[in-house]
Image (spheres, grey):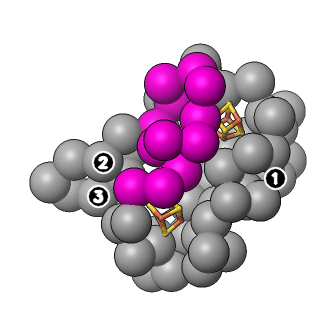
Amino acid sequence: MEQLRLKRELCGECGGCVAVCDYEVLELANNGLGIKDNLCVKCNDCVIFCPSGALEIADE
Ligand code: SF4
Ligand code: SF4
């Protein structure tokens, strides 16, 4: 199954992907970016948007 993954060491916590996602999958909290993967439709928009390549969709 495909899963959205975060490479935490690359994430600058800019919040841009949170705004790009239409499905409220992503949220920025004190401990960094959170992913509610069950809501993610794997549209790839956040992956394309992320300026630091921190997000990827990969097989589990
Ligand atoms: S767009 Fe990329 S760098 Fe910015 S918060 Fe999302 S994953 Fe992190
Ligand atoms: S792949 Fe699409 S639905 Fe999933 S978090 Fe990224 S923008 Fe949202």
Residue type, mark 3 in image: Gly
Mark positioned earlier in the residue sequence (1 or 3): 3
Q: What residue is drawn where x is 75% and y is 45%?
A: 45
Q: Is residue 37 visible?
A: no
> Residue 37: x and y, percent?
58, 30
Q: Is residue 38 above or below residue 6?
A: above
Report which residue position mark 2 lands on.
28
Dot 2 beta carbon under 8 Å from ligand 1: yes
Q: Is residue 29 visible?
A: yes
User: In which image quadrant can residue 31 be found?
Assistant: bottom left
Q: Which amino acid, by three-letter code, is at mark 1?
A: Ala
Query: What residue is rendered at 62% in x and 65% in y?
Result: 50
Above or below for 2 versus 13: above
Q: Which residue: 49% across, 24% down?
A: 24
- Relative depth, front residue between 21 and 31: 21
- Ligand 2 under 8 Å from disc 1 Cβ: no
- Quarter of the image with the C terminus is top right
Spatial CA distance of label 1 from label 3 is: 21 Å
Task: Residue 34: say if magenta.
Answer: no
Contact between marks 2 and 1 (CB within 8 A): the answer is no
Q: Which residues are magenta?
A: 15-26
Label 1: which secondary element: strand
Query: Foreground mark, 1 or 3?
Result: 3
- Count of numbered circles in the view: 3
